[in-house]
Structure formats: structure tokens, C-alpha cells
Amino acid sequence: MNTQPQKQFRALLLGDSCKDIYHYGSCSRLSPEAAVPVLKETRRDSRPGMAANVLSNLQSFGIEVDYHTNTETIEKHRYIDERFHQHLLRVDINETQKTQELEISSIDPLTNYDIVVISDYDKGFLSPEVCRLITQQCAENNIPVVVDSKKKDLSCFYSCIMKINQKEYNEIQKQPNDSEFVVTLGSNGAKHKNVIYHIVSPVEVFDVCGAGDVFLASLVYGFLRKGGIRHSIPLANEMASISVSHMGTYTLTKEDVEKYHDLCVRH
């Protein structure tokens, strides 16, 4: 089966990235200093996270991506009891960026892209002013924009497809302008314009870390293939369900893409 797009799609990805570092081990005793478990670390794993995870998954679909992100590294250290898949603690380093915000002058002309993807973890790289200018320019040039943002004031986004989880949706303080929402519902799938799209192949959940990034990348690919957001939600649901069945931040494999590729054709 040929799983590559019929054309070479080109996307612009903007967003905050981090390094996800997993400290795996086992806990067999409590600390004598406090009522907390002692983790005996046995191995460590490092993976690209946040927007960098979106990048990896867009590339898994064969999309050519131009990528702009923060230069100062954010680290998220997770400590996990591997025997029980128990997440014990997370420690974030350099969470708030000290580097300059994204400058629009550093981006190629937006008309060079089939789509713009914004993975905004609200760490300081993407200011509201930059988001407003980019999305307005895209609207003027009929370039679709898919956004996943942690901002509570979304009024800086114009004419976008907003991917958001239910908790974040409930906490919105200001709505985006002329935009539509895809609201993820965890094991219940996703909702778009009051229609709920259920997951076809439920799985045992091991870790939800990075599942939203996989959903976002899959949503973008489905949109590019079919030209409509509702046709891409079933694919995004299934790909995100693959992600949560693995421990840690997950990048889709060739086999994953081949397994559910037909969803882009049928819907």
C-alpha cells in the first residue's frame, strides 16, 4: 500500500518545544526522611516533546515541514515506577522562555505552504501579536491554520481550526474570531459542531503524554488529504489511541500509518 500523500504537502509549524526525559526504575521502600517512595533508577530515555513531537508525527505522514521553535531548551523530567506504570513526579526546567519571541520576518512567505500548524504551549515563544498577524495573513491568502493552544485568551487567533481538550475548552476566557473547534474527549473520542466521533478501536491506556500532539498531526494530515476537518477526525482519534497505548511521548511508525491510512480514503 502506498501511504504517501498524492502530492508532497508542505506545512509551516510554529510552537514551543521541549525535551521529554523519562527516568524509569522501581520503588521498593519509603524514604526515612519523608513518607515518599525512593526510586531506584534503572534506565533513562529522552524524546522530543511538545511542538517537536508534532513535527516528528507530521513527518511520519510524509509531510515536508518548515519548523520554528524556541532556542532555549525546556526539559520535562518524569520519574516513573516501571513495574506499575506509575508516574511519580515531574520536574520542569526552563519552563518560561527567556529568549526572544518568534519574529515574523524569519518566516518564509506564507503562500509557500499548504497549511500552517501552531502548537502553542504558551511558554513565551508565540506572543498574541504574532499569532494575530500570522492567522490574519493566512486568512487573507486562504491558507488553512490548525491551532492547539494553551492560552486562555484565544482572541488572537483568526479563522482557524482550534484543536483543544475539554478541560481547556471549559477554561477559555475569550473566544477566537471566526474559528471552529475540535474538542478532544479522551476515551470518548472528539466533538466537532455537536457531533461526537467515537474511537473505533479502544485500547488500554498506559500514558496520555503527547497524545494531543499525535491527534494534532493526524488532524492536519487528514485535512490535507480530504480538504475537510470532519473527515480527518476519525483518523486523529485512532492515531491518538495508538499513542496512549505506549509509555512516554510517541512518534507514529510506518506500520501505524499503514494500519489506519484507509480512514483518509473512506471518510
Image (cartoon, rainbow, N blue to C red):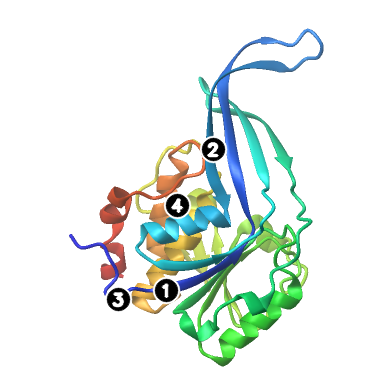
Earlier residue among tags 2 and 3: 3
Give the amino acid at mark 4.
Ala
- 240, above or below 113, in the image: above
Earlier residue among tags 4 and 2: 2
Residues at discs 4 and 2 in contact (Cβ within 8 Å): no
For label 4, the residue is: 240
Quarter of the picture holding the C terminus: bottom left
Residues at discs 3 and 4 in contact (Cβ within 8 Å): no
For label 2, the residue is: 46
Measure the C-alpha gap from mark 1 to mark 2.
28 Å
Give the amino acid at mark 3.
Lys
Secondary structure of the residue carrying tag 3 is loop
Secondary structure of the residue carrying tag 4 is helix
For label 3, the residue is: 7
Secondary structure of the residue carrying tag 1 is strand
Quarter of the picture holding the N terminus: bottom left
Q: Is residue 146 visible?
A: yes
Q: What residue do we see at 41% from left, 68% from top? A: 64
Q: Residues within 10 Å of mark 4 (few under 14, many from 20)?
A: many
Measure the C-alpha gap from mark 3 to mark 1.
9 Å
Q: Residues within 10 Å of mark 1 (few under 14, many from 20)?
A: some
Residue occupying the far bottom of the picture: 140
Measure the C-alpha gap from mark 1 to mark 4.
22 Å
In the picture, the disc for residue 204 is none
For label 1, the residue is: 10
Q: Nearer the viewer, residue 236 or 98?
A: 98
| Percent coordinates x, y for residue 95 in the rendering | 74, 48
Mark toward the viewer: 1 or 4: 1
Mark toward the viewer: 4 or 2: 2
Earlier residue among tags 3 and 4: 3
Q: Residues within 10 Å of mark 3 (few under 14, many from 20)?
A: few
